Amino acid sequence: MNANRLAPSTLETPMKIVVESGSPTPQVESLVADAFGPDRFAKAVYRLRDGVDAEASLSLVAIDKGKVVGTLRFWPVEIAGQVPALLLGPLVTCPERQGEGIGSKLMHEGLARAAAQGHRIVVLVGDEPYYRRFGFHRALARRLELPGWVDPARFLARELAAGALAGVGGMIGRPAGAEREQKAGRAA
């Protein structure tokens, strides 16, 4: 069969989801900055992430034709200083590729990996109508709190293990020891 007669999609490499290697790439940083703008750093979830490394094995990127078209990260947190959990976000898809299921693929892959690694609870701040399809609900977060103001209708949780949130409540914070080491030479 003549290669010129093949449909273009059969000649292209399909989109793949891979673990982000090392520090976020400029493509990932640009994608997040374009989606959320500079005000994102003032939000409660960004303050929880500041100075803490994302879970490396759960920092995913969607790549299509050599370009980053989506990203998803998870961050370690603790509920009431005792119960480990993950904070999901940001989830970002290139604006020109929204509606193609890239975000859904990242979510399914990320949640499956998190569950396989033994994580039991995931929280996020986002639109419940979108995240409900992945098992996130406001009702599951009703006994949880974030430091700083968050619209309660957007604070959602999901159990990766049945009953993981039973009897669990309190403030979500950084886990002990999760802070990155301060750079040498920085004032104490």
Image (spheres, rainbow, N blue to C red):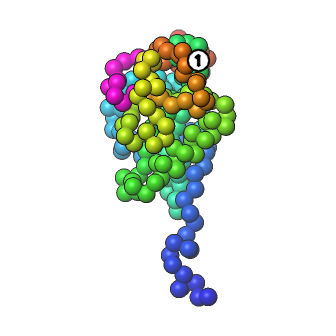
Q: Is residue 49 above or below residue 72?
A: above
Residue 167, quarter of picture: top right
Nearer to me, 188 or 39: 39
The secondary structure that most of the magenta stretch takes on is: loop
Q: In this view, does 21 lie above or below 94?
A: above
* Residue 129 falls left or right of residue 83: left
Find residue 63 and report its horizontal and vertical position in percent. Answer: 53, 55
* Residue 155 falls left or right of residue 9: left
Find residue 142 and report its horizontal and vertical position in percent. Answer: 42, 20
Q: Reply yes or no: does residue 182 show up in magenta.
A: no
Q: Is residue 68 above or below residue 13?
A: above
Residue visible at 57% across and 51% down? 17
Instruction: Tell me which segment is drawn in magenta.
Output: 146-155
Q: Could you tell me the amino acid type at mark 1?
A: Val
Find residue 39 and report its horizontal and vertical position in percent. Answer: 32, 32
Helix, strand or loop at mark 1: strand
Q: Can you say which quadrant of the picture contains the N terminus?
A: bottom right
Q: In this view, does 72 lie above or below 14?
A: above
Residue 125, quarter of picture: top left
Residue at numbered disc 1: 83
Which residue occupies the extreme right position in the image? 117
Residue visible at 43% across and 57% down? 100
